[in-house]
Amino acid sequence: MPSLIDMRRRIRAVKNTQQITKAMKMVAASKLRRAQERVMGTRPFAKQAKHVLASIAARVDQSHHPLLAQRAGVKTGKTLLIVMSSDKGLCGSFNTNIVKTVGSYLREHKGREIALGLVGKKGREALGRRGFPIRFEYTAMPKVIGFAEAEAVAQPAMEDFIAGKVDSVHLVYNEFKSVMQQNLIVEQLLPMEPIEVGKGEAGTVDYLYEPSPQRIFDELLPRLVEAQVLRALLESSAAEHAARMTAMDAATRNSADMIEGLTLTMNKVRQAAITREIIEVVSGSQAQG
Amino acid sequence: MAIPTTLRLEFVTPERAIVHDEVDELQLPGEEGFLGVLPGHTPMLVSLKVGEMWYRKGTQKFHGFVGFGFAEILPDRVTILARIAEKADDIDLERAQSAKRRAEERLAEVVKGGASEMDYERARIALLRAITRLQVSQHSRTRS
């Protein structure tokens, strides 16, 4: 039977753990709020950029732009998979789910040549040694993910695609749906979907262009790709904080249950010891009397 | 169609929306020169370079920094899609100053023949950005 001192020590240890998980939960909650705001912040740019592109689309030749090229190998040829995981653990099934999704993608596309682009330490640990060529690895992302990081991820992807080294580029990331739920997303980054010619007002406005419409179109397209990568990175970071918050909340509740159970056992042990002592005293005095 | 009296300004970067306001006048650093925009401007799409922009609301003038991007100008609306941008108040002076020093050092290195053409181009743009940031912040403080 465990001694009273052992039990007390055990309870104290669990309490300490609980304090840590509680603190981590709070930190994750406040980081989540900021991350969510940043995800929202990317929306206006994407919306406005698409609007501008739609209004130029009618006046330029889209077919030649390399980022829009629908090559024969889009569905079957070589592809680059950009996998976004977290740098830190203790966030529930966040990274496991990502790795699982990549695993099932690899199974479904067995015949394809696949290269990986890994973002985040955890993804590298899980996928780095599976024998797939690694195009790039980014670990230790800064706490505040900005446009520079998105550029660093999008640049090599666009280069490879334009150079014809890969026929398509996909993003795999966790999307923040709600605090309790993260959706796994596999989406095509390149080739981009063809830009639809704007209808109604946007399509009919006769703009002056400085410089030419073609150049504006060509320069705006890569920005849109970068914006898409940025949004994915931010979604992933928001989802990570949400996952961590949920995981730490569960851990805090579990440790509360554990403390309750341990306290109960401890009291039982204590009571048993007291009862035994009383019996000893009573039987002792009876034997004398 | 009557000429509109104000411009709806949407100033966004991929990271966040910077300004979302009704303004009376603005100036932008176009790739082929600065351009001023008043309500009723003819529709126009302009590519932007690194430079200073400002907009006026009544008698108040606000300054900002733009680093590459595009602007869509319509008679009653202006949308700026910038790659990097900051309002004058948000500019980190110390950071700009140290960036300027770094860029100057790197340029000196290129002159000595220690770096490639690409480094030169990168340093040149970095210097341009730093100087423009400092200017924007200075203008905003002296004029308003």
Image (cartoon, coloured by chain):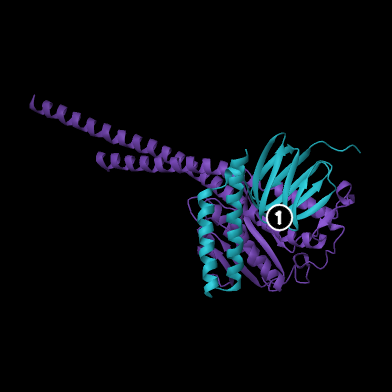
Chain colours: A purple, B cyan
Secondary structure, mark 1, is strand
Residue sitting nearer the eye, A19 or A121: A121
For residue A237, above or below residue A104: above
* Residue A12 falls left or right of residue B87: left
Residue sitting nearer the eye, A184 or A238: A238
Residue sitting nearer the eye, A205 or A42: A205
The residue labelled by disc 1 is B69
* Residue A228 falls left or right of residue A137: right
- Label 1: chain? B
Q: Amino acid at mark 1?
A: Gly
The residue positioned 36% from the left and 42% from the top of the image is A16
The quarter of the picture where the N terminus of chain A appears is top left
In the rendered image, residue A40, in percent from the top left (x then y), is placed at: 65, 44
Residue sitting nearer the eye, B59 or A274: B59
Residue sitting farthest toward the front: B142
In the rendered image, residue A86, in percent from the top left (x then y), is placed at: 53, 55
In the rendered image, residue A105, in percent from the top left (x then y), is placed at: 65, 63
**Which image quadrant is residue B124 in?**
bottom right
Residue sitting farthest toward the right: B1
For residue A78, above or below residue A192: below
**Which image quadrant is residue A194 in?**
bottom right
* Residue A36 visible at all: no
* Residue A185 visible at all: yes
The quarter of the picture where the C terminus of chain A appears is top left
* Residue A259 falls left or right of residue A250: left
The residue positioned 11% from the left and 26% from the top of the image is A285
Residue sitting farthest toward the left: A288
Residue sitting farthest toward the top: A289
* Residue B84 falls left or right of residue A18: right
In the rendered image, residue A128, in percent from the top left (x then y), is placed at: 53, 67
The residue positioned 60% from the left and 56% from the top of the image is B129
Q: Residues within 10 Å of mark 1 (few under 14, many from 20)?
A: many
